[in-house]
């Protein structure tokens, strides 16, 4: 069930993004609602995995894969629509490839990104990358940025003064989420040396 939810949220996010390209008010509102559902499901899959003892290496991989697909899809869609600068998806994609490449080596050696077998060995690295607080904080930063960016571009409300304010807030939140993204990837890179040492 947890793995099913991890995969289902990808398709919900795809529908939300599809609505971004339909220039109607109802499509914009639908995109916001589906975005909230998609991000809520990110926490739900982990809860169900722990509740029903379904935690596994596959679940960990699917969870991260789902996060990457959903996050990158939004950044790319926003950039395509001209709502954010192209540097946003470029940085996020680069960070994802770097950290996930390292994590694939870690997985081959029996480590996971989170949980008891986490590849992070330092306390600060574990806190930044694997702690529940930081994972939730990063998810909230992303979803708030995404929701406000979408809200600022709902068709039919372009002339309202609040729209410009929302657009500015959305860009600031997106910048914060981008910095958060990079910072959370640094410990993975810094602590990866042990994975490549000769035994």
Image (cartoon, grey):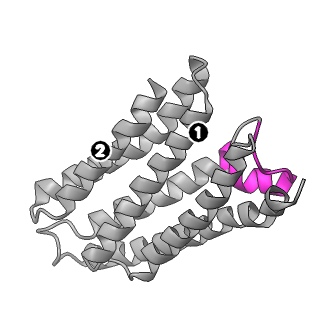
Q: Is residue 56 left or right of residue 130?
A: left
Q: Mark 1 — residue?
A: 60
Give x and y (percent) for residue 47: 55, 28
Q: Is residue 19 magenta?
A: no
Q: Which mark is residue 11?
A: 2
> What SS does tag 1 mark?
helix
Q: Is residue 59 left or right of residue 124?
A: left
> How far separated are the C-alphas under marks 1 and 2?
19 Å
For the point 34% across and 72% down, the residue is 166
Residue situated furthest right in the rendering: 199
For the point 61% across and 66% down, the residue is 98
Q: Is residue 129 magenta?
A: yes
Give x and y (percent) for residue 169: 42, 73
Q: Write down the quadrant of residue 41 in the picture.
A: top left
> What SS does tag 2 mark?
helix
Magenta residues, start to end: 117-133
For the point 39% across and 82% down, the residue is 85
Q: Quadrant of the N terminus?
A: top left
Q: Local crowd at mark 1 within 10 Å, few (<14), some, or many (≥20)?
A: some
Q: Nearer the viewer, residue 32 or 13?
A: 13
Residue situated furthest top in the rendering: 52
Residue situated furthest front in the rendering: 199
């Amino acid at each position: 069930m947890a793995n099913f939810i991890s995969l289902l949220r990808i398709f919900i996010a795809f529908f939300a993004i599809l609505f971004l390209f339909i220039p109607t008010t109802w499509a914009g509102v639908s995109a916001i609602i589906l975005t909230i559902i998609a991000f809520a499901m990110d926490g739900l899959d982990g809860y169900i995995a722990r509740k029903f003892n379904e935690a596994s290496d596959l679940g960990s991989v699917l969870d991260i894969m789902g996060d990457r697909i959903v996050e990158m899809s939004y950044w790319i869609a926003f950039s395509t629509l001209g709502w954010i600068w192209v540097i946003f998806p470029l940085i996020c994609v680069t960070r994802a490839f770097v950290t996930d490449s390292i994590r694939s080596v870690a997985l081959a050696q029996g480590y996971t990104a989170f949980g008891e077998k986490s590849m992070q060995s330092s306390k600060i690295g574990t806190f930044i990358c694997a702690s529940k607080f930081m994972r939730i904080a990063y998810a909230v930063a992303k979803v708030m940025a995404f929701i406000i960016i979408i809200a600022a571009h709902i068709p039919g409300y372009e002339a309202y003064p609040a729209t410009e304010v929302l657009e500015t807030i959305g860009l600031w939140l997106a910048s914060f989420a981008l910095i958060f993204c990079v910072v959370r990837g640094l410990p993975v890179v810094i602590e990866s040396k042990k994975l490549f040492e000769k035994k």
